[in-house]
Image: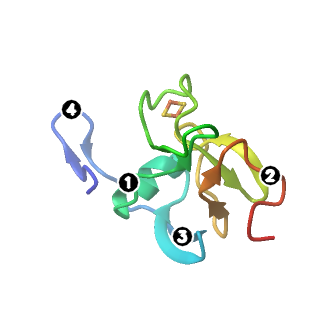
Amino acid sequence: MRVEEHPILGEMKKPNVVEIEVDGEIIPAIEGEPIAAALLAAGKSIFRYTRKRNEPRGVFCAIGRCTDCMMVVDGIPNVRTCVTPVRAGMKIQTQHGLGEFGGPLS
Ligand code: FES
């Protein structure tokens, strides 16, 4: 769900919709929006699993402070997706533990 008409900000301008790949699945996203927003709009809420207990984590603070939203983005682990803007063609993977450069699928 996205807010397309806001009482203060007004109507949303026509977005530039692009495609990103998330764990092998292509989903639509708005260029420039935080990756986390695109994932939540696509119904995805688990972004990583913790190292010790393998517990799921997702968006918590949404301002780049808590690191719960870290994922592997274009092969780089520990990217905070709540403050990283979408670019067309990004490859995003759920992060397990501390993550690996190149990601688990490479
Ligand atoms: S949700 Fe806290 S850093 Fe992204």
Q: Which mark is residue 100?
A: 2
Query: Under tag 2, what secondary structure?
Result: loop
Q: For the N terminus, give its image quadrant.
A: bottom left
In terms of sequence position, does the residue under pointer 1 or pointer 4 come before the other?
4
Please, is residue 15 above or below residue 11 in the view? Answer: below
Q: Position of residue 88 (x, y in %)?
A: 63, 66
Label annotation for residue 84: none
Circle nearer the N terminus (4, 3):
4
Whole-Å distance between the Cαs marked 4 and 2? 42 Å
Judging by the rendered image, the residue that carries numbered circle 3 is: 18
Which of the two discs, 4 and 2, labels the residue nearer the N terminus? 4
Q: Looking at the rendering, which quadrant does residue 70 occupy?
A: top right
* Placement of 51 over or under 66, stated as above or below: below
Can residue 33 be seen in the rendering of this structure? no
Do the CB atoms of the residues marked 4 and 2 lie less than 8 Å apart?
no
Mark pair 3, 1: CA separation: 16 Å
Question: As shown in the figure, which amino acid type bears the numbered disc 1?
Answer: Leu
The image's mark for residue 8 is 4
Residue in the foreground of this view, choosing between 55 and 31: 55
Disc 1 marks which residue? 40
Q: Label 4: how many residues lie within 10 Å, few (<14), some (14-19) or many (20+)? A: few
